[in-house]
Amino acid sequence: TVLLAPTTMLARQHVTRFSERLAGSRLPVIRFFQGMSKRERAEALARFGAGEPCIAIGTHALLGKDVEFGALGLMIIDEQQRFGVGQRGALFTRAGDVAPHVLVMSATPIPRSYANALFGDLDLSELRGLPTSRPPVETSLCLGRDWPEICEAIRHEVDRGGRVYVVCPRIGPATDLEDPETGDETRTDGAADDAALTTFTELSRIVPSLLVHGRMDTRDVARAQDAFRSGSVRCLVATTVVEVGLDVPEATWMVVRGADRLGLSQLHQLRGRVGRGQRGGRCLLVTDTPNERLRILERSSDGFEIAEADWQQRGSGDLAGSLQHGHLRFRCLDLARDLDLLRVAAREETAFSKGVR
C-alpha cells in the first residue's frame, strides 16, 4: 500500500497516526520523503522492489524514477487536488504489470475529478457533514481597506486565547496566478513570501507572531509550527504552505488576504484549518473586489457544493488529457444546465456495463 501526500508536513502526520494505530502489528510503516538518510532510502527502495508487505507513506519523492513497487495493491492519494494528472499517473508506471486499486481523497475535488465522478468514471463515496461537536466555520467577506480594523480584531482574538492563521497568496498579474494543470496556485514564490513578510511586520507590532513561507529552511518551518501548535505563539503568518497538513484543534481564526487570488478549493481547504476544537471557527476573506464566487463560501460549507460551483465556473478541462480546467464544448449539451440528464446517463451506462459483463 502506498499513501501519497502533497507535503512533508502532512506525510509526517500520516506516519505518526498509522504507526500509532498499527503498533504491535507485523505491518511496517515506511516513510519516504525529504530528510531521509541515504541508507534509510536505499533500504526502503529495496523493500518496495521486493514487494514486501508494508505501508509506504511519502510525498513527491515516491514519484522518483528510481522507485519501483514489486507488488503494489492499493494506491491512496490524499489531497488529490494538489497533484497534477502527470504526477498522479506517475505512480501507475511504478506499479508493475498489475494495476493497483486506487483511492483518491479530497474535501473539494478539482473540476476534472468532479466531472469524472459525474460521467461515472469514478465510484464516489461521500462523507457529508461535520462531527456533531463541531459547528460550521463562520465565513465573512471583508474589504481590504478595513485591514487596520481586522488587525485589531486579530489582536482581540489572540487576547481571548484564540489562535489565528493569516495567509497571504501570491501577488502578481491574474495571468500568472494559475497552474497550467490545476488552475489553482500550487506553490509559493518570492512575491508571496514578501507579502507574508510585510504582513508579519505589521502584525508583530501589535501581537506576538510567527512567519512561515516557502523560502524558509524546513527545520525553521517545523519549529514555527510547533510553537503555534503548543500555543507559545498564537498568530501564524504564512503563505499557502499551511493549506494542508497542519492540524491544530485550538486554531480559531483563518484570515486570508487577497482572497480573490485563490481558487474556491484552496479557500475551502484553508478554512478547514480552523474550528476543529471546542471553540467555533471563523474565516475572514479579505479582498478589494468582493464577487459572487467568494460569496459561495459565505453561504456554504459543503465541499461538494463548492466543487460543483468551481466546476461550473472553470470547467472540467480535457478529461482525456492533462488540462484540469476549461469548459468542454458541445453542440447542444450544456453540462451545468443539463446536470440531471448527465447523472441519468451515467447511471444507465453503469447498469448497461454491468449487464454486459
Image: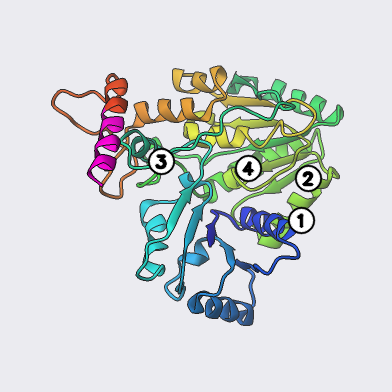
Mark 4 = which residue? 196
Q: What is the x, y in percent for residue 113?
A: 39, 40
Mark 1 = which residue? 223
Q: CA distance from mark 3 to mark 4?
A: 40 Å
**Disc 3 marks which amino acid?**
Asp
Query: Pointers 1 and 2 in contact (CB under 8 A)?
Result: no
Q: Magenta segment, which residues? A: 345-357
Q: Earlier in the sequence, mark 3 or mark 4?
A: 3
In the image, residue 150 above or below residue 73: above
Determine the main secondary structure of the stretch shown in magenta: helix
Give the structural element (helix, strand or loop) at label 3: loop
Query: Pointers 1 and 4 in contact (CB under 8 A)?
Result: no
Identity of the residue drawn at 28% across and 19% down: 337
Q: Nearer the viewer, mark 2 or mark 3?
A: 3
**Disc 1 marks which amino acid?**
Arg
**Disc 2 marks which amino acid?**
Phe
Mark 2 = which residue? 228
Give the structural element (helix, strand or loop) at label 4: helix
Which residue lies most toward the left here? 331
Say whether residue 354 is magenta: yes
Which labelled disc corresponds to residue 123? 3
Q: Earlier in the sequence, mark 1 or mark 3?
A: 3
Q: Nearer the viewer, residue 82 or 219?
A: 82
Label 2: few (<14), some or many (≥20) within 10 Å? many
In the image, residue 83 above or below residue 111: below
Quadrant in the rendering for residue 280: top right
Give the structural element (helix, strand or loop) at label 2: helix
Say whether residue 83 is magenta: no
Q: CA distance from mark 2 to mark 3?
A: 38 Å
Q: Earlier in the sequence, mark 1 or mark 2?
A: 1
